[in-house]
Image (cartoon, rainbow, N blue to C red):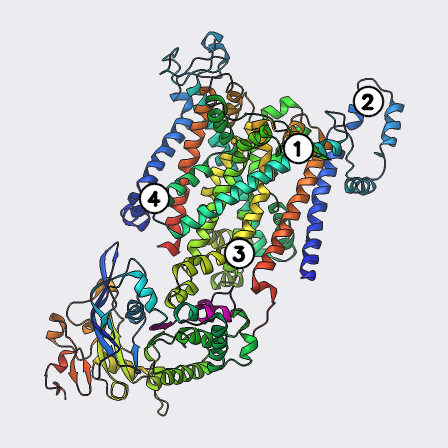
Amino acid sequence: MLARALDSDIWHSFRGSPITMVSAVVALICIAGAMLAPWLAPSDPFDLASLSLGDAFKPPRWSDGGDPAFPLGSDGQGRDVLSAIMYGGRVSLLVGFAAVLLSTVLGLALGLIAGYVGGALDAVLMRIADIQLTFPGFLIALLIDGVVRAVLPAEVHDRIALLVVICAIGISAWPSIARTVRGSTLVERNKEYVLAARIIGVPAWRIMLSHVLPNVLGPVLVIATLNLSGAILAEATLSFLGVGMPPTQPSLGTLIRIGNDFLLSGEWWITLFPGAALVALVLSVNLLGDWLRDALNPRLR
Amino acid sequence: MIAFTLSRVLQAIPVMLTVALISFLMFTYVGDPVAIMLGQDFTEQQRTKLIHDLGLDAPILVQFARFIGNALQGEFGLSYRLSRPVSELIAERAPATLELAGCAALFALALGLPMGVYTGLYRNSWLSRVFLTFSLIGVSLPTFLIGILLILVFSVWLGWLPSFGRGDTVQLGWWSTGLLTLSGLKALVLPSITLGLFQLTLIMRLVRAEMLEVLRTDYIKFARARGLTDRAINFGHALKNTLVPVITIAGLQLGGIIAFAIVTETVFQWPGMGLLFIQSVGVADIPVMAAYLLLIALVFVAINLIVDLLYYAVDPRLRIGRGGH
Amino acid sequence: MAAPLLEVRDLRVEFPSRRGTLTALDGISFAIAPGEVLGMVGESGAGKSMTGAAVIGLLEPPGRIAGGEIRLDGERIDNLPYERLRRLRGKRIGAIFQDPLTTLNPLYTVGRQLSETMLTHLPISPAEARRRAIGWLEQVGIPAAARRIDSYPHEFSGGMRQRVVIALALCAEPELVIADEPTTALDVSIQAQVIALLKRLAREQGTAMLLITHDMGVIAETADRVAVMYAGRIVEIGPVRDVVKAPRHPYSAGLMAAIPPLAARIERLAQIEGAMPRLAAIPPGCAFNPRCPQVFARCRDARPVLRPAGASQAACWLYDDPAGGGVHG
């Protein structure tokens, strides 16, 4: 089976596009660097005991005043920027993946139900989706985040910020997935194999899960992959605005916000390097997603 | 046509009501306005009286109705943070956001449309590749990062343009504009580009994709078979057919500009409604949040409506109904 | 025949693919006299549409002409620069495509599309173009032409739309029209009308036609001569009556036999065993040999060329005798 995979059109198109291969490598590096941060990072930026203000505001290693212990410089508290980026990337990726997972599962479930069961349930669900779709996803995420923030006292909010952000972004993205899934479900529902299963008496949930689901999964996966970069960007924006991940558990967006304060006074590296890391991550995910979409598009083959 | 408009307006009402409901629920259940207004020491009597004065002891539906009534008159109470009427705050800030959004939209359309058409027509030229690479980067860069980069280059390193604020503004009646002063115009440049860049890349990719689709159709093939000039085919047929769906989708995207103004205003400390909103989220200033929410919902619903009407006006297939056979 | 209008000699069309270069048309040769209707039949994928596309210069890249010549009135047109080829199209060679629902631009009125075509090629004024457009609509049988000229395509039925397409193809008065499956997408009842219209107009204007279709009935009614295509090659070409009544090539014989007879009762529809080979897997020798009921050794070794066989020509080793007698007479 591996041999077949290696010979398939998809693999050929992958090998044929150097950009795609490069972005796959970059993405892998970013992901590995981020996920393995606790083992790979030069220092732990959150171990308050190990920080010293004497190390603050060191520029990157290659400029004057640079220190090899801080390859990309240090911030106002003496934290190593490189380590902060790696840990921050971890958070960014975690939120991104979890949010996409949430929205995909939610979208799949609701789309399947709406498409299969039909009737009033379908009408209500789609109406809700339509209302939500009138507004950009980002605003919805911002709203959810803002309301939760308003309801909970500050310390509680900081502790569950991760959960809140994931839910906010995840909920903001379910409608478009649900609509696609519903469309595919409607098509599959009328096919003979489903009718046959119903006649035999297979329960509805079983039909949906084992028969319909595999067939609607294809386009959903492509959408989910493309949504990943959007989720990462949404989280970064929320954190930059101050309503996402707090400084105690910063993502790349939070780091950029913190560094922004020092931009005008000349310590550009504190905000720029996290920014570059974010761009590298999102760009490579986008390129991979683009390639995946083109490779799976039957019309372009 | 009238029937069409009416049906769309009717469809918009549930949306507005839902948003109003969310707003109202925020108002009612989040935080305790009574406690905020009364401060630390208060007697039970004072509290009861205030509750009654504010009408908070009436049944929920009555409160909701009152809320909607007030909202329709633009009355949202006082901001918790600034103790000024919310409507006044919004009216003060609206021109800043609207001018910014307008300039950004103009920038996005004026550049995005031609770039999209060019990359659709001349797929393999080097300029197209440049544009496409640029668009890919544009889609991967978050708005705030673009702002930061622009500030870094044009304010900090080159010193050409200001990095925050609106510059000098001129008051024209109720509206304050930055378009009439040099410093105002200079202050508009970086934020407009920041806000418009993402939309520009979206529009460019949209136009390009649509153009490529159209160029593959049978009617373009037939036009070629009839020996029509390239100019007639590309700009007469292909372009026109491309713009029809693009107008609508682009219109909807431009609504996103109002949303993303929040980010741009934060980066550039631009005194608009978006900055006001973020500041209120930070301190749970519910009246401002609720008002902003309703206003934005209204704007989006209006945009959706206008776009629907535009589509109707531009595509003859929708206009003449199902006649023919 | 007298000096042919269209002459195609040894035309080869290739397109590169991941699996190497595929030959879609392999040495096609035929000619069309002025005012003549040449039918082109064959299964899907045999190369009929590609021939039409090659003649009018609209091969989709990466397909390209890899050899041979196409001459219109004696001049070569397959190697013309883009602009000269464009001026040929519509004015000297017209085209009609299969699906009337997608061939017309939905955003322009029928009159606008007609006028535009005429103004591109004929030295007339816009007012004159409009007048003629109305005339054309009348000629193709659209009632209330003066009113319908400002209608949009979606306001016409499928059959009406195809008539508009015919008008568009003929309005610049070309000498040759390539009709690619002009009636396949239409209701059966409309098909006859449209074919009759096409035939009449072509005869009135003296326009030659390359009629591409898989429908033998249409060919039998409309064409003067017919070419049978298989796997990118012409296997038989000759006067329509001869090819239909007395097909020489075993493939043509199979095709004609597959049409159920109206009068007799039959138990099973006659079929040709097997299927046409994919472009990447064309067998050596005669392309039909794996399926041919009369195959013999030579068929697998060498590829036959068109040789006289009765009143027609057939590319088959059965007709190796240059005198035209053939092995089986």
Total number of numbered labels? 4
Q: CA distance from mark 4 to mark 1?
A: 48 Å
**Residue B173 relative to residue A270: left or right:** right
Q: CA distance from mark 3 to mark 2?
A: 57 Å
Judged by depth in the image, the label closer to the viewer, 4 or 1, is 4
Parent chain of label 1: A
Across and down, in percent, residue A248 comes to 54, 20
Parent chain of label 4: B
Residue A136 visible (yes or no): no
Q: Is residue B55 magenta?
A: no
Q: Which mark is residue C209?
A: none
Is label 2 in a helix, a strand or a loop? helix
Rendered image quadrant of residue B83: top right
- The amino acid type of the residue labelled 1 equals Val
Q: CA distance from mark 3 to mark 1?
A: 39 Å
Judged by depth in the image, the label closer to the viewer, 3 or 4, is 4
Q: Which mark is residue B126?
A: 4
Parent chain of label 2: B
Q: Are marks 2 and 4 on the same chain?
A: yes
Q: Are marks 4 and 1 on the same chain?
A: no
Q: Nearer the viewer, residue A277 or A269?
A: A269
Q: Are marks 2 and 1 on the same chain?
A: no
* Looking at the image, residue C166 lies above or below residue A280: below
- The stretch in magenta equals C92-116
Q: Within 10 Å of the Cα at label 2, are there few (<14), some (14-19), or many (20+) other Cα atoms?
A: few
Q: Residue at x 46, y 27 (%)?
A: A275
Give the residue at mark 3.
B244
Parent chain of label 3: B
Is label 4 in a helix, a strand or a loop? helix
Q: Which mark is residue B38?
A: 2
- The amino acid type of the residue labelled 4 equals Trp
